[in-house]
Amino acid sequence: MSITLGLDFILRELGSAAPQGYYVALHIRFASPLVLYQTYDQRWIDHYTEQSYVLRDPMVAWGFSATGACRWSEIELPDPFDVFGQAASFGMKFGVAVACGSMQSRSIGGVARSDREFSDEEIGKISALINTLHRQTEPPEYLTDAQKEALQLIANGDRYAAAAAKLGISESALKARLTSARNRLMARTTAEAIQRAKDYKLL
């Protein structure tokens, strides 16, 4: 099983465990995650973004001050903008926050449901899934020269045939290099691989 397929499986499992959706910000550096997955109601995502709630969200504040898992109802931090109350109006009445990783590469996740609190067993599963996502999306420390050359040419706008000719290799060999780069960067597409390589300062 490829890493990407592995991630897809984990995200499906997380989706099954979170009836009202999830939000997972992985490897937050300089206040921005390197990888973000979210399935919350789009109306809530839009409202949350418009109001800049990430700077005011007690779940996020908890995630930077604690490690582990906690029900939203047990987070004892001020919520002056009533972020939890507003989330409830979008059907996200009960939730769990999960935080892991070092402060230099922190991952914070939230899952929600509308009907009841999450059980301890469910929280254990959700926490394990998010911790696994954190480990599997750890940015690589380097790309090979061959991978970087192939990505850079495509990033510069070359088509496969032209890029292969510039490198003096076959088109299939170029595609193999791009595939290995995508796998290393846990990207589904070459465009996503290029963006992640740039984000990781590898390109």
Image (cartoon, grey):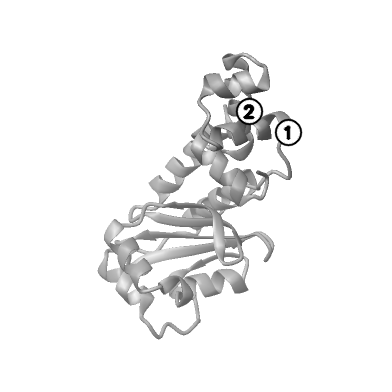
Tell me if mark 1 has few (under 14), some (14-19) or many (20+) residues whose alpha carbon lies within 10 angstroms of its own: few
Residue 48 at x, y percent in the picture: 36, 68
Please tell me which residue is depicted at 27% across the width and 65% down the height of the picture: 90
Pick whichever of labels 1 and 2 is earlier in the sequence.
1
Tell me if mark 2 has few (under 14), some (14-19) or many (20+) residues whose alpha carbon lies within 10 angstroms of its own: some
Name the residue tied to disc 1. 144
Please tell me which residue is depicted at 49% across the width and 56% down the height of the picture: 24
Q: CA distance from mark 1 to mark 2?
A: 10 Å
The image shows residue 190, relative to residue 165, as above or below, that is below
Residue 27 at x, y percent in the picture: 60, 56
Name the residue tied to disc 2. 180
Q: Amino acid at mark 1?
A: Thr
CB within 8 Å, label 1 to label 2:
yes
The image shows residue 130, relative to residue 147, as above or below, that is below
Q: Amino acid at mark 2?
A: Ser
Residue 36 at x, y percent in the picture: 49, 53
Residue 176 at x, y percent in the picture: 61, 21
Secondary element at image label 2: helix
Q: Is residue 120 toward the left or the right of residue 19 in the image?
A: right
Nearest the viewer among 148 and 196 is: 148
Total numbered circles? 2
Q: Quadrant of residue 16?
A: top left
Secondary element at image label 1: loop
